Image (tube, grey):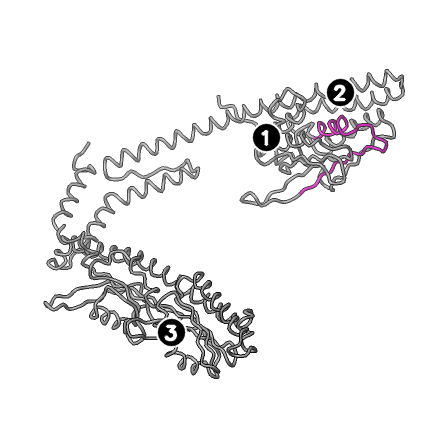
Amino acid sequence: MNFIRSLRFKFIVGLTLIMLPLFMLLYYNNVYAMKVVRDQVSLTNMNHLAKSVEQNERVLQETNRYLYSLGERDPDIISLFFLKYGSGDYIIAKQRIMNKFMTDIGFYNLIDSFFLYDTVNDDLLLATSGNYDVKMSVVQESMPVQIQQLEGEIQKPEWSIVRGGTWNALVKTVRINAQFYAGALVDMNALNHPEQFTESGDRGGAVIVGADGGALSDSALNSAQIKLAAAHITGLNNPYQVISEVTSTGNARQYLMLGIPSAMSEMNYIVLLPEEDMMRNLPFFQQIIRLLPIGAAVILITAMIFLRQLLFRPMNVLIRGMRRVSRGELDVRLETPASSELEFVTHSFNQMTSEIQHLKIDVYEEQLRTREAEFKQLQMQINPHFYLNSLNIIHSLASLQKHELVQQMAGHLADYFRFSLRAGKRVIRLDEELEHISHYLEIQKLRFPNKLDFVLDVEPDLGHYVLPPLTIQPFVENAIIHGYQRRTEPFVIRITARKSKTLSDPAPSSVLQLAITDNGVGFEQEILERLQQGHYAEDPGGQHIGIWNVIHRLLVKYGEHAGLQFSNQTEGGAAVHIHMPAQTEEEEGRAYAEPVDRG
């Protein structure tokens, strides 16, 4: 093997050329690593933030619907408008409303208070889970502004921001009628969940800010950080922002800023994550980025071109060849590359595909011969089965001394077994099979005069389609044996043949559908369940040998494209449905050609 032409030598040379300027690639790696960390951290925290905001907004929307519905479905609130102020009934109604509000606060986990305000009597009913005096003072101070905003306007779903001395809140007020207003109060701190966010460190945190940039909730962020975040509210449409803060020592400290504006009020949910904490696992790269010039792009492109010419292109050619072989194209032959190792691999691949091509032909021909032998063996099993039944019928007629019927049946039986001489063929035409069934049923009609009849319902132009011999006869025979029991009205067997289209294959194909139905007693439920589950195939030597023979011949010949279904008709009687590919003799000959003897 020529070492200079070997892949090992070329790889060593190429690796040496790449290692020399490796320090320049560190810059690119650092930038990429920082971007990945930013993307992952921002994605994780944005998901947490979006989930938290979605939960908050959903509770606020549900509270809106609750407040809007009070004036329509709460009888106590409606009755206050008609009761005399201060009366016993008025006080009882207010107490029921108070109890209802206290109960409903438990269902809305963010809601701090519900209230009902009587403008005529300047009476405020407040149900709260917090400090009653503080909440009462906030609601009383905000009511004039809330009522003024609702005068002459359509009620809007937005919540108003109420700023208190030590805390801020969201308030929503709706007009019940000309006298009463109902509302809800939400503590801003209940909307802020800083514990959900990762990588926040000691200097990070979450805060809710208003449109003016002022903080509305408590936060671990200091006033400078909140002011810095408020200055970048306009960029909240971006997945994240990298913003900088100049410290007292003159150093720049960077933060990853995430934010989502609220749809229910004029406020924004903000999260600040210090990059120093996020990048604590990349100190070496942080130092490299400050010292190295930009040069990674040129080296990377050079290395990729080198490896592409040396390794990637020959490997891609080999991979494409393997994919073609996996699709069945065994005539693939690859050109020999320059490297001695790849030359050996390519030569082995070409030799392998050639051997697989010959082996596949041998295996396929052997499978054809095996399938043909199995098919002929299964086909011959049904003749003795019917022969014994026919002899039993002749014996019964002779016992009754019905000599004319014996003669007629003997004629039909001769035609029947004359057909059996042709039944050794692989397939027969449908019209030949139906003629054979007609002889069989005529024999049965002679046995049961005026008690048995049959109908052949076949679509025109279906007689030239082929099927395995003696496919229908076992089911007709079973119908007479098991369905004809102590009947007073005629027993009728109907044989139907139809053709339909199917789109299950890549290309549309035709399906021959056969049905054998009767008006007898039908299948017993236990037997029907066993037939539907395919248990007739468990014991091929048992009482279902005819069914077992038919289904195995269909499976050997057509595989999954053929099948049997058993059922009872709603109006009474049994039904057997057979489906198989609709093929003429020429089409069947092309699909199941005789195997070629190669030697």
Q: Position of residue 405 (x, y in %)?
A: 87, 22
Of pointers 2 and 1, the one earlier in the residue sequence: 2
Q: Position of residue 378 (x, y in %)?
A: 62, 23
Quick check: 520 left or right of 167?
A: right
Residues at marks 1 and 3 touching, judged by CB atoms closer than 8 Å:
no
Magenta extent: 472-499
Q: Which residue is mark 1?
A: 555
Q: SS of the residue at dot 3? A: helix
Q: Residue at x 49, y 65 (%)?
A: 100
Quick check: 171 left or right of 504?
A: left
Distance from the alpha carbon under mark 1 to that under mark 3: 83 Å
396 drawn magenta:
no
Q: Position of residue 266 (x, y in %)?
A: 36, 73
Q: Which residue is mark 2?
A: 389
Quadrant, the N terminus: top left
The amino acid sitting under disc 3 is Met
Distance from the alpha carbon under mark 2 to that under mark 3: 100 Å
The amino acid sitting under disc 2 is Asn
Q: Which residue is mark 3?
A: 136
